[in-house]
Image (cartoon, grey):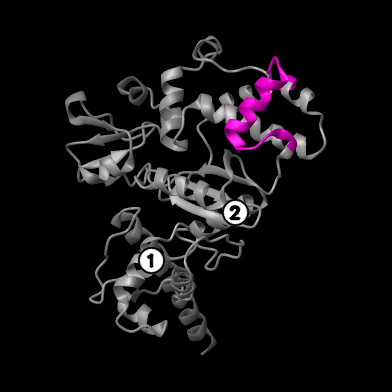
């Protein structure tokens, strides 16, 4: 990490962060700020680790803001993987083709929650599922992926999808992907009905939430996107750019009737506004049910889109947020700043007319 930092290697941006003890800030490895001495540097593997130690984000390289694209070396790796669908990419194969297996493993575990090998296998099988739906012969699909026998392909397919290739239904699939955002990696999952998960990639509860998805939908969860994922990625980008205030992508929510009522009420809180748990309960016609409302609020698995970040304590202070209070403050500041800018623009226009 020290060598990557000294080289200002931007391909390591998002893999680790540099904390500078003398200034109490943290940066991307590629930051152009003056290089601190080794004894004044600390390296961490997540934004949360840096924030928990009291470091502030650098205003020059803006380590919380990323462009949504993977590092160049990851893009090259995925291109290489797509060009060799019939090859099971072992560590030896990666090393032979110029990819450091340790670096690859660390990146995919951090950003996707699985090893690269598991990611690549599921990605290949996800592509195979599409071919099967389009009528491709099973044996041809299996051989194309490098399986030497029909039974081997069927076993691998069953392990991933929970059904045989011949019985596979395209609607019985949850696709999941990780994107970058101004608040760090976001994990997006979608069914054939809509978005079922938008969660922070470093949240500890994420593995539990993914297990819940598998239990709820009874479907295979494989890397990839569908039309709903693509729509959500575009809307999230517009949201962080400040040009979108209301999401329109269809959602596929799983919850009790009461939870759904709470989530409906959350979605009616205006952009840039906040509401207490008690006020939210009253708006629902359930005065005194703020604790139940709070639990339903915490059970929301479609963050940002269903804006649970807009709920605060009765005194206006921020309360626990699954993605961390810094993210809650970031989202509220982001929205309120856009509202203030809009109101300021309207005021200037009115003055000009006068």
Residue at horizontal 59 percent and vertical 51 percent from the top: 190
Q: Which mark is residue 234?
A: 2
Q: Quadrant of residue 5?
A: top left
228 displayed left or right of 142: left
Q: Main secondary structure of the magenta part?
A: helix
Instruction: Point out the residue furthest to the bottom here.
Output: 354
Q: Which mark is residue 297?
A: 1
Residue 229 lies in magenta, yes or no? Answer: no
Segment colored magenta:
143-166
Q: Secondary structure at mark 1?
A: helix
- The residues tagged by marks 2 and 1 sit, at their Cα atoms, a distance apart of 25 Å
- Seen from the viewer's position, the closer of residues 214 and 261 is 214
Q: Where is 244 relative to 5, above or below?
A: below
Return the x and y of residue 61 as percentages of the image width and height: 38, 41
**Dot 1 crowding, Cα within 10 Å, few <14, some 14–19, many 20+:** many
Q: Quarter of the image containing the N terminus?
A: top left
- Seen from the viewer's position, the closer of residues 182 and 77 is 77
Q: Where is 130 relative to 4, above or below?
A: below
């Amino acid at each position: 990490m020290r060598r990557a930092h000294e080289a200002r290697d931007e391909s390591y941006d998002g893999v680790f962060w540099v904390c500078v003890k003398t200034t109490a800030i943290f940066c991307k490895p590629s930051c152009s700020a003056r290089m601190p001495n080794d004894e004044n540097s600390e390296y961490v593997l997540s934004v949360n680790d840096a924030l928990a130690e009291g470091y502030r984000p650098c205003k020059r390289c803006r380590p919380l803001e990323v462009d949504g694209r993977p590092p160049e070396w990851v893009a090259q790796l995925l291109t290489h993987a797509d060009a060799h669908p019939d090859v099971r990419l072992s560590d030896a194969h990666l090393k032979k083709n110029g990819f450091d297996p340790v670096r690859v493993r660390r990146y995919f575990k951090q950003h996707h929650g699985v090893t690269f090998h598991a990611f690549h296998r599921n990605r290949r099988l996800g592509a195979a599922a599409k071919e099967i739906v389009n009528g491709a012969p099973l044996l041809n699909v299996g051989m194309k992926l490098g399986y030497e026998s029909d039974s081997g392909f069927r076993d691998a397919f069953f392990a991933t999808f929970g059904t045989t290739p011949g019985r596979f239904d395209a609607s019985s699939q949850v696709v999941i992907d990780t994107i970058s955002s101004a608040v760090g990696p976001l994990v997006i999952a979608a069914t054939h009905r809509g978005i079922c998960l938008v969660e922070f990639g470093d949240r500890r509860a994420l593995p539990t939430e993914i297990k819940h998805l598998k239990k709820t939908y009874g479907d295979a969860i494989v890397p990839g996107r569908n039309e709903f994922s693509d729509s959500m990625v575009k809307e999230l980008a517009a949201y962080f750019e400040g040009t979108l205030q209301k999401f329109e992508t269809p959602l596929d929510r799983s919850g009790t009737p009461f939870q759904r009522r709470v989530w409906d009420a959350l979605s009616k809180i205006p952009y840039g506004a906040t509401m207490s748990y008690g006020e939210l309960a009253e708006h629902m016609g359930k005065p005194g049910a703020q604790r139940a409302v709070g639990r339903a609020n915490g059970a929301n698995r479609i963050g940002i889109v269903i804006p649970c970040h807009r709920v605060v304590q009765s005194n206006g202070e921020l309360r626990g947020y699954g993605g961390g209070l810094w993210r809650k403050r970031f989202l509220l500041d982001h929205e309120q700043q856009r509202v203030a800018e809009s109101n300021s623009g309207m005021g200037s226009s009115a003055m000009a007319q006068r």
